[in-house]
Image (cartoon, rainbow, N blue to C red):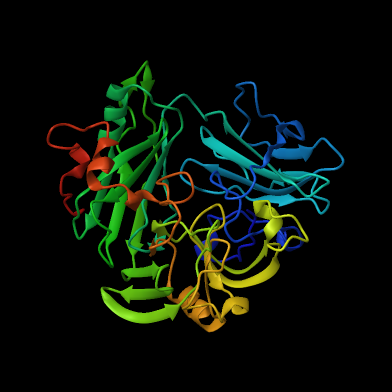
Amino acid sequence: MSHQPRPRTALVRTLLLTPLVAAGLAACGGPSPDALTDKPYDAGDHISFRGVGEGRRIDPDRPLEVTVREGGSRITDVTATDGAGRYVRGRLSEDGRRWRSTAPLAAGAHYTLRVSTENGDGRPGRRTIGFDTAPADERLRVTFGPDSGTYGVGQPVTAELSEPVRDRAARAVVERSLKVRSRPAVAGGWHWVDDRTLHYRPRDYWPAHATIEVRSTLDGVRVGDGRYGGRSAPLRLRTGDRIEALTDARTHRMTVFRNGRKIRTIPVTTGRPGFDTRNGVKVILAKESFVRMRGTSIGIPEGSSDSYDLPVHWATRVTWSGEYVHAAPWSVGAQGAANVSHGCTGMSTADARWFFDTVRVGDIVEVVGSGGETMTPFDNGFGDWNLSWEQWRDGSALTTDGGPAGSARLRPSV
């Protein structure tokens, strides 16, 4: 799933591609682990990764590079993200044979690299690998996310460790050292997503217009196995109004609330059978004023009855795999009456522009009544809110009969 974000503050977390390359790569309901079409082929034999593989830690100061080995194939999309969800900027060559990062990688970080390809017959391929960058030193450090700024009330806090921590006792030491305070105070806790990534969320959404301060006290603390914590930069966030968009796929309506008050009802169309929109709570990841969407990105061959190649405006992204809320002037006749999309939520251009201008990254989009599966918690965006509070607490290394220490009501900073 490729995308072409504008250079705006809300989009600093998305991968930047050249306009020429980004055109024709994005797709509504784009590549995902649960694609609803034929399974893409393994592109590992068709591409090579410079400096990645064989258990080596790569130099964070060297560019990351992906190239095509076979002449009949081309790269259609590359994304590289760290454990905190930050994207690495990169540039894809015009002929689709080479992608190269254009921004330095972080030291001591774990990255996931996802590459989508297309062979000479137009069939999509995919390859996902993980790799680590060499640490600046042997100290265990933490990087908090997202970037400082103002977000919606659904935005989780993320913490990425410079090294994996697998031992439960060591995890408890780390978790006790990650401090989150908010004004107003809320109940919340950390959840271990994997060996080096944690997410923090309240029991319920953050309050509107809250201040959230995150810091680490790991510096100099013995974690275990001879490791000690290092210094880490603190994080300060704010939340805006509480914006929630509830889409009912059965009634084909989206209702938008601000601070609990209904402010607009919008006729929409969601995914048709076979391309059903995911149910559940999603968090807005980015706002892209223009995206090009192609059916080939989800395995629909050119020339088939399902094929499409569309310029899409006012696109609000809710999954990394390519689910958006966007303008769909071609389906206005179905909006409010039927579900005809390939997985996205479509609406009129005027409504999509209003929605785009009203929401911010971190706001809530919830879908009910669809035939699709529930949004997964961690592998396709921020589906954190689809876990119950009890399930969330179970992901803490501090869980006791009384719940994790992080679930206690937090005092405001002084």
Relative to 218, say whether 381 is above or below.
below
Where residue 412 appears, as percent x and y from the top left, is 19, 54
Q: Residue at x 71, y 37 (%)?
A: 43
- Quadrant housing residue 267: bottom left
Viewer-nearest residue: 361 or 115:
115
Q: In this image, 333 relative to 368: left or right?
A: right
Where residue 315 appears, as percent x and y from the top left, is 56, 68
Viewer-nearest residue: 166 or 368:
368
Q: Residue at x 63, y 50 (%)?
A: 89
Relative to 201, say whether 3 is above or below.
below
- Residue found farthest to the left: 402
Where residue 82 appears, as percent x and y from the top left, is 52, 41
Relative to 303, say whether 352 is above or below.
below
- Quadrant housing residue 237: bottom left
Viewer-nearest residue: 147 or 276:
276
Q: Residue at x 41, y 75 (%)?
A: 253
- Residue found farthest to the bottom: 350
Q: Quadrant of the C terminus?
A: bottom left
Where residue 338 appears, as percent x and y from the top left, is 50, 73
- Residue found farthest to the top: 225
